[in-house]
Image (tube, rainbow, N blue to C red):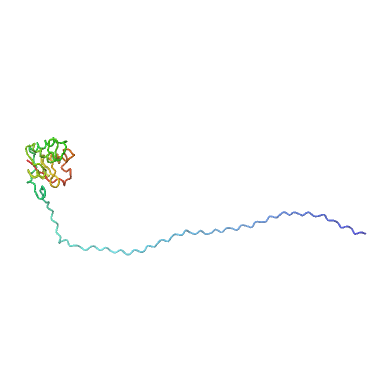
Amino acid sequence: MAPPAAAVMAPQAPVYTPPQPTAAAPAMPMTPQPQMAPQTPAQPVAAPMPPATAMQAPPAVDTSAYAAPAPATPAAPAAPTASAGAPLPPQALAGTPTAKAEKAVAFARAQIGKPCVWGAKGPGSYDNAGLTQASWTAAGVPLPRTAAEQAQIGTAVDVTALQPGDLVFFFDGLNHTGVYTGNGMMIHAPGPGAFVREESIFHAGETALRGAIRPA
């Protein structure tokens, strides 16, 4: 007998096994970290103050040897001078202007507005001495031609005792003059290019005024 044929086995299909979920490892708890306190800069340590030293009083001064100063005696005002060492005539006191002085002032006032011309003595124009000469000539009192010459006639007057009609003089050499009209004012011919006008006797500053005379 022939041996039985071997049975042929049908191929087995592979069996699919689904993957099994893997359990997650438990999370490790977080340990809180300690917070560092902010660093404070070290403050410099002040050096100890030395003990206060008591102030010593200054030595006493013996004042018995010092006498109180005597009150100053005001000096008498110096008399105005015409020029280097030449004194003006004796001073006169203030008073009521004379009729001649009033005429001189009236004449000078009538010339206000006329031009000032070097060397002119009227009637259309004047220089400073020409105006004062013409003013007093109109009052019947002739005067020299220049301001310095006019300062040597009549009676010297302190500037605190002026009265209308007096002649006031200015600058070194007394080379400018005008007719005093009262209340610190005068009429004069200022200079070439200007016009006869009335203005303060201190128009050029107090130090410019050097003296005054009363012609009559």
Residue 120 location, x and y as percent? 13, 39
Say which quarter of the image contains residue 100. Answer: top left
- Quarter of the image with the C terminus is top left
Q: Nearer the viewer, residue 177 or 73?
A: 177
Relative to 20, is 178 above or below?
above
The outermost residue toward the right is 1
Relative to 128, is 32 above or below?
below
Direction from residue 2 to residue 58 in the image, left or right: left
Say which quarter of the image contains residue 49. Answer: bottom left
Relative to 178, is 7 above or below?
below
Say which quarter of the image contains residue 193. Answer: top left
Residue 10 location, x and y as percent? 82, 54
Direction from residue 176 to residue 48 in the image, left or right: right
The outermost residue toward the front is 119
Direction from residue 32 to residue 96 in the image, left or right: left
Residue 203 location, x and y as percent? 17, 43
Q: Nearer the viewer, residue 184 or 204?
A: 204
Q: Nearer the viewer, residue 162 or 17?
A: 162
